[in-house]
Image (tube, rainbow, N blue to C red):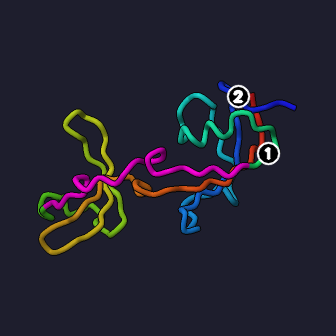
Amino acid sequence: MSQANDGHTVRIHYTGKLTDGSVFDSSEGRDPLEFTIGQQSILPTLESAIIGMAVGDTATVEIAAADGYGPRIPDAVQQVERSMIPPEIDLTIGSQLQASGPDGQMLVFTVVEVTDDNVTLDGNHPLAGKDMVFHVELVEIVG
């Protein structure tokens, strides 16, 4: 029986949960997630757990916040004057805005608070500071 190894393209079904049991992402009802092992397209801890699995194998993978999206960084939450944001931009709580950083890197911010004068934007990844548990099933080894 073939096992998933570095360089293989694989397809997995997965459910990602926080440690309180709440689901934050799942492939349920969708096509399996396809990726190539070794291309760093998924979390390294999750990828490592898939190496050596055979089609039909399942695993539960616990990922500490430090090994996932890192800690929450308080300085990544910033307040901006509302007048600095063009009026056509959606400022609904939870909406995401993109901006260019000083080095030209694309940054994503989530709107977390809106007042008449200010908008509070959070530059942390939504899963930063959170421990996660993934339930995965290797569906196919494509090549």
Left or right position of 111 against 1: left
Residue nearer the viewer, 70 or 124: 70
Would you say residue 76 sits in the magenta stretch?
Answer: yes
The residue located at (68%, 39%) in the rendering is: 50
Q: Position of residue 60 (x, y in %)?
A: 68, 52
**Crowd rating for badge 2 (residues with CA inside 10 Å; few <14, some 14–19, many 20+):** many
Dot label at residue 5: 2
Residue 105 relative to residue 143: left or right: left
For residue 57, the mark is 1
Binning the other alpha carbons within 10 Å of mark 1 as few (below 14), some (14 to 19) or many (20 upward) gives few
Instruction: Tell me where residue 25 appears, x and y as whole percent.
Output: 57, 58
Label 1: state its secondary structure: loop
Q: Amino acid at mark 1?
A: Asp
The image quadrant where one finds the C terminus is: top right
Residue 25 left/right relative to 9: left
Pointer 2 or 1: first along the chain: 2
Q: Position of residue 99 (x, y in %)?
A: 26, 47
**Residue 48 on the magenta segment:** no
Residue 103 screen position, x and y as percent: 22, 33
Residue located 30% across and 49% down the image: 98
Tell which of 79 and 116 is nearer to you.
79
Region in magenta: 59-80
The quarter holding residue 113 reads: bottom left
